[in-house]
Amino acid sequence: MDGTTSTDVAVVGAGAAGLYAALVAAAEGAAVALVSRSPLAQTASYWAQGGIAAALADADSPAQHAADTIAAGREAARASAVEVLCKESPERVRDLQKLGVRFDADRAGNLALGLEGGHSQRRIVHAGGAATGRRITRTLSALAATNERIRVLEPVAASALATDGDGRCTGLTVRPREGGPVALSARAVILATGGMAALWQRTTNPRGAVGAGLSLASDAGARLADLEFMQFHPTALRLEGPRDGFLVTEAVRGEGALLYDAQGERFVEELAPRDEVALAIHTELERTGEPAVWLDMRHVRVERFPNIASALADVGLNPARDLLPVAPAAHYTMGGVATDLDGRSTVPGLFAVGESACTGLHGANRLASNSLAECLVFGRRAALAACAEPAPAGGAVTAPDGRTPGAPNEETRAALWRHAGLCRDAQGLAELRDDPYPLARLIGAACLAREESRGAHQRTDFPDTDDALDCMHSLLGSDEEPELKRWL
Ligand SMILES: Cc1cc2nc3c(=O)[nH]c(=O)nc-3n(C[C@H](O)[C@H](O)[C@H](O)COP(=O)(O)OP(=O)(O)OC[C@H]3O[C@@H](n4cnc5c(N)ncnc54)[C@H](O)[C@@H]3O)c2cc1C
């Protein structure tokens, strides 16, 4: 690569959303540049254990999937986005099968559908037990690497977005690990940079999940939405050492695993939606001062979850014999770059998909296994819309001298855990407003603006849900105070 180059569509991020969007755009005939900072194994997509939610069973329907999604989202999910996801997700699962992903099947060859918290039907497709993300990303990345219309730029980081005089996104600056910055012009840029859960001290996510796309987008003038809604997963391993935060998928509770307190008593309905289970565990830990509660999967067929069994074996735990110490950890970013149902941000020519985007789909609490489905459904829609964007009017793009949005320091991560953790209040959140990390300040502002408790956002100073805020989403730009807006 030299100092300037061009493409039709630039996709930033090579998780499930970016890979799938790149393949769809290429199939439409576009020249695609796929920019990825990290190796494949460091994407959240690769780590995904549960599966993809899709109404594929005879007894199921997109309407039932939608009703479960809306109920889990605590009256804050955007109904139009939910409808799109639930209608299109079965077709996207079939697309993946056609592309070569082999999902787990029963003896008769029918897809084996799993149950997870908040779902009223068995509708989760898995691949390789709990290796769904790995199987999908491996297949999609092999296809992207051999597609003649896709130029894979790796390890290369996007460091700034370029905009023209009308505020239209015309490309981006990328920085290879070695060598100088390169200006890449494109008719459309699709951000697929994943979420920001690794901004929190305790997380299930890869360390690179620091919301780079949100920072790039807000620096380019795009609005962000729902930053107050960070989902905490209830059952992340609580250990000293590198396996701390390792996720034990909800699917094991779907297969009968139970949660016990320090006295060996059950204290929560294990298959309730995530916000409820996480809050119940948090309350239990606050009450007892214990570091963890106990997950009992001794009666679950462990061979169905080989990667969990092997991760546990690494730390000397045997799920057939031992109770597992678990506690909540930051897991999934419901907020993100505000987009419409075709991934368009508020900056023309700039799109966002997957966990970096916020269509409002998840409301205040994501339903399990809806995010891989979201990567595929909205990844495809954004790719089609991006291909229809007009070619840039000017010549070569002027590269802004951007710096790759870096990782926060440990003080910021500790501050987010302390002040924007499972329970928040105005006093702690006000401290975040002075944090040196810009995204932490925006998160603090969004959390302060929502003066109620709903789903993943629990304010001890506003413990009730305010019905007047049903369907309201918080929107803010880098220099703006949050605005609450109704999205239908
Ligand atoms: C442990 C775990 C288990 C999960 N299990 C499930 C599940 O079973 N079902 C489900 O639906 N969801 C699950 N999720 C959530 C789901 O995996 C994610 O929401 C989804 O995979 C996000 O995909 P993505 O493509 O948006 O982002 P990612 O997969 O995180 O990919 C982000 C990409 O962006 C790149 N990137 C970031 N910044 C830059 C930059 N500046 N320049 C260039 N590239 C950049 C990264 O290198 C990476 O390639 C799980 C998440 C985790 C962490």
Image (cartoon, rainbow, N blue to C red):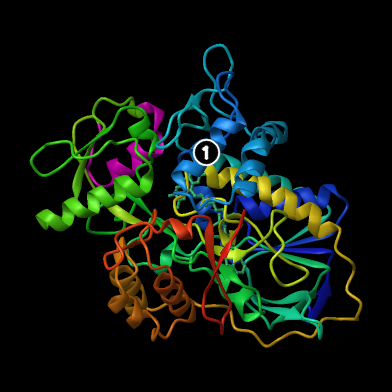
> Which quadrant of the rendered structure holds the N terminus?
bottom right
Q: Is residue 312 magenta?
A: yes
Task: Specify whether 347 is left or right of 244.
Answer: right
Regarding residue 246, the answer to whether it shows in the image is yes
Regarding residue 243, the answer to whether it shows in the image is no
Q: Is residue 335 magenta?
A: no
Please state the extent of the stretch shown in magenta in the rendering: 303-319
Quadrant of the image occupied by residue 356: bottom right
Quadrant of the image occupied by residue 52: top right
Task: Identify residue for label 1.
Answer: 132
The percent position of residue 165, horizontal first and vertical second, equals 81, 86
The percent position of residue 238, horizontal first and vertical second, equals 24, 53
Q: Residue furthest left?
A: 263
The percent position of residue 221, horizontal first and vertical second, equals 66, 79
**Residue in the foreground of this view, choosing between 192 and 304:** 192
Residue beneath the point at 52% across and 38% down: 132
Compared to residue 137, the image places residue 291 above or below, namely below
Taken as a whole, is the magenta stretch helix, strand or loop? helix
SS at mark 1 in the image = helix
Q: Residue furthest front?
A: 468
Q: Amino acid at mark 1?
A: Thr
Residue beneath the point at 23% across and 54% down: 282
Count residues near mark 1 (Cα–Cα under 10 Å), then give few for <14, some for 14-19, many for 20+: many
The percent position of residue 314, horizontal first and vertical second, equals 29, 45
Compared to residue 140, the image places residue 227 above or below, namely below
- Counting labels gives 1
Task: Specify whether 408 is left or right of 277.
Answer: right
Compared to residue 433, the image places residue 53 above or below, namely above
Task: Specify whether 388 is left or right of 86.
Answer: right
Mark 1, ligand 1, within 8 Å: the answer is yes
